Amino acid sequence: MIRLFIKKNNIHSNKLILSKEEFHHFNALRIKPKEKIELLVINKKILLIQVEKLTKTELFFTKISESPLPPPLYPQITLAQCLPKQDKFTEILKKCTELGVASFIPVLSSRVITKIDQKSTEKIHRWQKIILQASSQSKRAQLPTLENPLTFKDFLPYSQNKKFDLKIVFWEEASLQTSLKSILSTTKITNNIMALIGPEGGLSSEEIAALTQNGFITASLGPTILRTENAGFLACGLIQHLHP
């Protein structure tokens, strides 16, 4: 069954106000009268509805049932991803949203080649759209959050937020003995985990030193070197799998 995320302010009695983008999305999904779909009111509830009529600006429906949102999945994973070249970050967002990552932080470390304004609203809006689409496709109950890009200098104080029980930087030069399994099994509370992935070319030794001084633990993803766009997906998947 199709699940779509909507804002509370856009729903009025038995109709949903549509933006131009939303209408095109609904139209692409070939939603027809009498079809049943789920409307997830962001951070509020899930509505099961039957579509009655779709216009370019409104969707009219009959409500069948209403249910509360399920509790969030644990561990809550924040993926801090040093921005890769080209458009690889969009694939990272898609895959890791489907995987259940709770939040994303684009990081501009010293070896990042991609040039981006930290307040590039157009690109950030596109990334948010990708997260929304991936959340709908994977039938998530909570939308991941997306921070504005942070320089490495700004990222360090952000990472000191007390909500993180565990902070891991996945580094190709970390000892193979420092496995993710051993880190998770020896840490008492791991409900909120931050995972940091470096860019092409990796993190510098100075950056690793600064991270470890700020409470990060270095960990290995194995004996081979992964592409940055694959490392985050594997790291987050392993965290979920190995989480006690």
Image (spheres, rainbow, N blue to C red):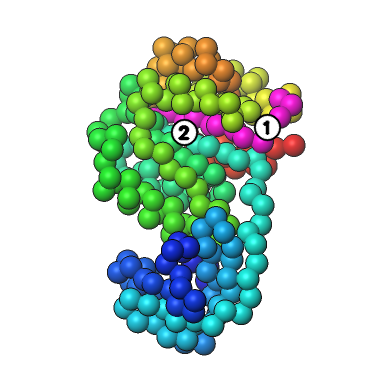
Taking the spot 28% from the left edge, 30% from the top edge, the residue there is 113
**Mark positioned earlier in the residue sequence (2 or 1):** 2
For this rendering, which residue is in front, 111 or 16? 16
Taking the spot 54% from the left edge, 44% from the top edge, the residue there is 102
Picture layout, residue 79 above or below residue 151: below
Q: Quadrant of the N terminus?
A: bottom right
- Check disc 2 and give the amino acid type: Ala
Quadrant of the image occupied by residue 47: bottom right
Taking the spot 71% from the left edge, 25% from the top edge, the residue there is 187
Marking on residue 190: 1
Picture layout, residue 239 above or below residue 178: below
Which secondary structure lies at badge 2?
Answer: strand
Crowding at dot 1, Cα within 10 Å, few <14 / some 14-19 / many 20+, comes out as: many
Taking the spot 41% from the left edge, 21% from the top edge, the residue there is 203
For this rendering, which residue is in front, 232 or 79? 79
Q: In which quarter of the image is the C terminus?
A: top right
Is 85 within the magenta?
A: no
Marking on residue 89: none
Looking at the image, can residue 28 be seen? no
Residue 239 % position (x, y): 63, 37
Q: Distance between the residues labelled 2 and 1?
A: 17 Å
Quadrant of the image occupied by residue 234: top right
Which region of the structure is painted magenta?
187-199
Is 192 within the magenta?
A: yes
Looking at the image, can residue 198 be seen? yes
Picture layout, residue 189 above or below residue 146: above
Residue 175 % position (x, y): 59, 18
Residue at mark 2: 80
